[in-house]
């Protein structure tokens, strides 16, 4: 029996002149990519072919090159050399050239664990917003799957092998709501914890052994889980990150410092290796840095979050964009400017205070303006503003917008907001807080002399409602 398309397509790594088309089949296949002018699907042309092989779980990408800036196109995939029907083509628009001031809007959020195969109210709603808000792309900030959620991952147990993790992606991304959304919105993704296991971290900087919280281990022991499901062995981390690379990083922009991999394509964690899943991209006069807050994370007593390689890449990027891009987004899977009283797990930047201070100090000393932090993870959402205190006496606005969860239970523990005690921050204020399923929409407006950035949270509480902040 011939193979069928299992997941996708997804359009990733979009820029002003290129993109990547991703898809996964359910067996060996040849993937064909098609491109057409937005209003002339009859003249669709074949733009690439690749074999989908078992080494990558039958996932693959087709790069698109030589696209025109700020131009509408449509794309499609097939597993045969015949173009698919018109209803299988999906529109997108390339970005304006780097540095060009042009207004745009995008969506962001995190945490997708629908209660059943019919779950998906947020993604159904987001799909409608693509046209009404003229969304150019989306940011998925982690927990795109819950590999450790035995009740909702399709396995009925914790994922432990590469085949398990691949199966969780197949199960979760096959829900009708996400399956309908993925091809229609160009996407940039990063990971949080549940792509591997809950609140996971390395034991020491050598990154040879990993842990999950002792409470999770004990709870799984009480429930009778076998050792491989209640302990985070190194092979399980490598399997999880291999599946993550196949489904999320394969269609991302090029990594700033790529990982070494073995003959099977699995990540090799070497002591002092500077690699991470961090990358950057640009939308006209706005610059984005996608942080990797997981794969370098080491627990106490070390409390390492980003790793020196990523710090160097981040600081170099900030220096490069400081004067050339008036709007800068630091995209973090977890919150930086919103500590809260009941953060028992210390799984956010507040659990790594020295690294948080390092970032705030760099931004303040270098007087970097126009910085907006985008975050997920909390199963609640907020907007926080503050001012960076420069040594020269300047007060520089900074803001954090958080949207979470897409489709998960909401958690009210983060309601007890605590301003950060830092010499680099002043005028901290939380403008709103919501704990309902939601999606964040950001409008970047370059029409006036100074850019304006507006965060609108769309949340579901007895129907869809909105709350906004322009910062």
Image: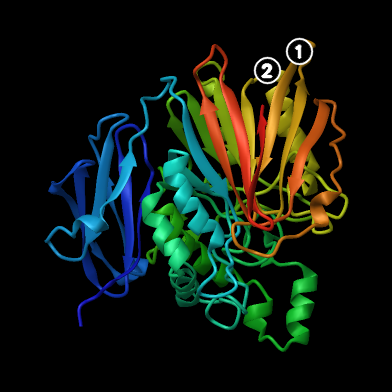
Q: Disc 1 to disc 2, how far (Cα)?
A: 8 Å
* Secondary structure found at label 2: loop
Residue 8: in sight, yes or no?
yes
Q: Residue at x 62, y 72 (%)?
A: 148
Q: Residue at x 64, y 79 (%)?
A: 229
State the residue in front, 154 or 411. Answer: 411
The answer to whether the residues at label 1 and label 2 have Cβ atoms under 8 Å apart is yes
Name the spot of residue 427 as percent of width and height, x first.
Answer: 83, 25
Residue 307: in sight, yes or no?
no
Residue at the extreme bottom of the image, as rendered? 224
Q: Earlier in the sequence, mark 1 or mark 2?
A: 2
State the residue in front, 411 or 155. Answer: 411
- Residue at numbered disc 1: 394
The quarter of the image holding the C terminus is top right
Q: Please, is residue 423 above or below residue 199 in the view? A: above
Q: Residue at x 59, y 67 (%)?
A: 113
Q: Please, is residue 187 above or below residue 100 in the view? A: below
State the residue in front, 424 or 305. Answer: 424
State the residue in front, 187 or 88. Answer: 88
Q: Residues within 10 Å of mark 1 (few under 14, many from 20)?
A: few
Judged left or right of residue 192, residue 131 is left
- Residue at numbered disc 2: 367
The quarter of the image holding the N terminus is bottom left
Residue at the extreme front of the image, as rendered? 463
Judged left or right of residue 282, residue 229 is right
């Amino acid at each position: 029996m011939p193979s069928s398309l299992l997941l996708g397509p997804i359009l990733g790594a979009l820029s002003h002149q290129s993109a990547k088309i991703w898809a996964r089949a359910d067996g060996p296949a040849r993937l064909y990519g098609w491109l057409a002018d937005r209003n002339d699907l009859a003249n669709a042309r074949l733009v690439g072919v690749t074999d989908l092989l078992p080494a990558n779980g039958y996932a693959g990408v087709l790069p698109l090159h030589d696209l025109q800036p700020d131009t509408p196109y449509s794309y499609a995939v097939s597993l045969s050399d015949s173009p698919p029907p018109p209803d299988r083509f999906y529109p997108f628009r390339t970005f304006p050239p780097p540095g060009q001031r042009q207004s745009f809007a995008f969506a962001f959020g995190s945490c997708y664990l629908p209660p059943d195969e019919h779950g998906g109210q947020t993604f159904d709603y987001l799909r409608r917003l693509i046209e009404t808000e003229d969304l150019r792309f989306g940011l998925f900030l982690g927990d795109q799957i819950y590999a450790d959620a035995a009740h909702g991952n399709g396995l009925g147990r914790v994922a432990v092998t590469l085949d398990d993790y691949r199966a969780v992606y197949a199960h979760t991304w096959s829900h009708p709501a996400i399956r309908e959304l993925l091809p229609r919105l160009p996407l940039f993704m990063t990971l949080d914890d549940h792509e591997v296991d809950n609140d996971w971290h390395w034991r020491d900087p050598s990154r040879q052994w990993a842990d999950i919280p002792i409470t999770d281990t004990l709870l799984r022991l009480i429930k009778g889980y076998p050792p491989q499901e209640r302990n985070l062995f190194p092979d399980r981390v490598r399997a999880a990150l291999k599946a993550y690379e196949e489904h999320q990083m394969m269609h991302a922009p090029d990594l700033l410092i790529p990982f070494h991999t073995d003959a099977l394509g699995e990540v090799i964690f070497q002591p002092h290796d500077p690699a991470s899943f961090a990358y950057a991209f640009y939308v006209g006069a706005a610059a984005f840095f996608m942080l990797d807050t997981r794969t370098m994370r080491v627990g106490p007593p070390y409390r390492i979050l980003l790793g020196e390689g990523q710090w160097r890449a981040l600081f170099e990027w900030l220096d490069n964009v400081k004067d050339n891009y008036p709007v800068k987004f630091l995209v973090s899977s977890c919150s930086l400017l919103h500590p809260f009283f009941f953060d028992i797990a210390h799984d956010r930047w507040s659990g790594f205070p020295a690294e948080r201070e390092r970032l705030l100090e760099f931004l303040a000393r270098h007087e970097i303006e126009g910085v907006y932090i985008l975050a997920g993870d909390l199963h609640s959402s907020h907007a926080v503003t503050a001012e960076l205190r420069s040594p020269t006496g300047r007060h520089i606005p900074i803001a954090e917008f958080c949207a979470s969860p897409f489709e998960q239970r909401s958690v009210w523990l983060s309601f007890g907001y605590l301003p950060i005690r830092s010499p680099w921050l002043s005028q901290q204020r939380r403008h709103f807080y919501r704990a309902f399923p939601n999606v964040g929409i950001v409008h970047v407006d370059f029409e006036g002399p100074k850019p304006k950035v507006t965060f609108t949270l769309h949340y579901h509480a007895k129907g869809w409602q909105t709350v906004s902040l322009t910062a």
